[in-house]
Amino acid sequence: MPRGYRTAPLGVPGVIQGSPYSVHILQEGFSHPPLPDGSFQADGTITLVRGGPVTLLVDTGGPWGSRRLLELLAQHGVTPENVTDVICTHGHSDHVGNINLFPKAKVMVGLDLTREDGWYIPHPLGAGGRLELDPGLLEVMGTPGHTRDHVGVVVKGTAMGTVVVAGDTFERDGDGDAWRALSEDPAAQERSRGAVVALADVIVPGHGAPFRVLKDGDVGDMTGEEGDEGDVES
């Protein structure tokens, strides 16, 4: 596993092409600084993965955005009935607010995996394994920390390499230590962040723009811009 890494802006708006699966950022998440009373406004990133037999939605945003989500899907020629799988990285309201729009899909919220009519499905994530959605191409990995049942989605074979839709394991590029205050288990999240960095060429965070991950020896982006730096635990 690499000892260090740096990040760089993705430089590609909205879509990461791939074969067979492409990654479409339907909504870029955000989180604004808190007001004096401690309240703050936030919404989660919503990502569509499509191109093969699986049509996957990763996180669904907050319930206040249901109409907008349907409009965003329609812009890509996707109806709720077309969505085969919904993976919510964790159970916070800005990530799970619209799962009711997809009653025919298999739905995962944290470590709960269900299918139509409320059937709960066993899977290997709780024991440290991966849930394969399309073997060799799409899988779900456990990324505990932000919540103890947090998960991420791995998309292989894109034009930019392996994409990890990471939910709130990463709040945004360059989130430094800001994520720690929101973490249920910072030590576990530190390990999860390291595992994601070691695997990913691109990370889609929960509340910001997607970004590239450059390990030692990688060539940086053409602009030379750099983001956060960090160590990856071995």
Image (spheres, rainbow, N blue to C red):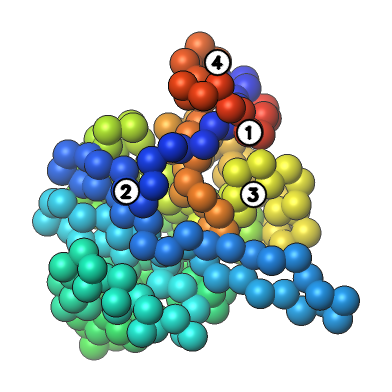
Amino acid at dot 1: Gly
Q: Nearer the viewer, residue 121 or 158?
A: 158
Mark 2 — residue? 15
- Kind of residue sitting beneath label 3: Gln
Where does label 3 land, which residue? 189
Residue at mark 4 to residue at mark 3: CA–CA distance: 22 Å
Q: Nearer the viewer, mark 4 or mark 2?
A: 2
Is 80 on the left-hand or right-hand side of 146? left
Q: Residue furthest top?
A: 217
- CA gap, disc 1 to disc 3? 20 Å
Q: Nearer the viewer, residue 25 or 198?
A: 25
Q: Residue drawn at (72%, 62%), measured in percent from left and top?
A: 182
Answer with left or right where residue 194 lies relative to residue 220: right
Q: Disc 1, disc 4: CB below 8 Å?
A: no
The residue at 21%/55% (across/down) is: 50
Residue 217 screen position, x and y as percent:
51, 11
The 10 Å Cα crowd at callout 4, few under 14, some 14 to 19, many 20 or more, is: few
Residue assigned mark 4: 216
Pick the residue in front: 131 or 35: 35
Tell me residue 215's x, y (percent). Answer: 53, 21
Would you place residue 66 above or below residue 3 in this image?
below
The label shown at residue 227 is 1
Q: CA distance from mark 1 to mark 4?
A: 15 Å
Question: Image quadrant of residue 82?
Answer: bottom left
Q: What is the three-letter code of the residue carrying label 2?
A: Val
* Sequence-earlier tag: 1 or 3: 3
Q: Position of residue 187 (x, y in %)?
A: 71, 47
The outermost residue toward the front is 223
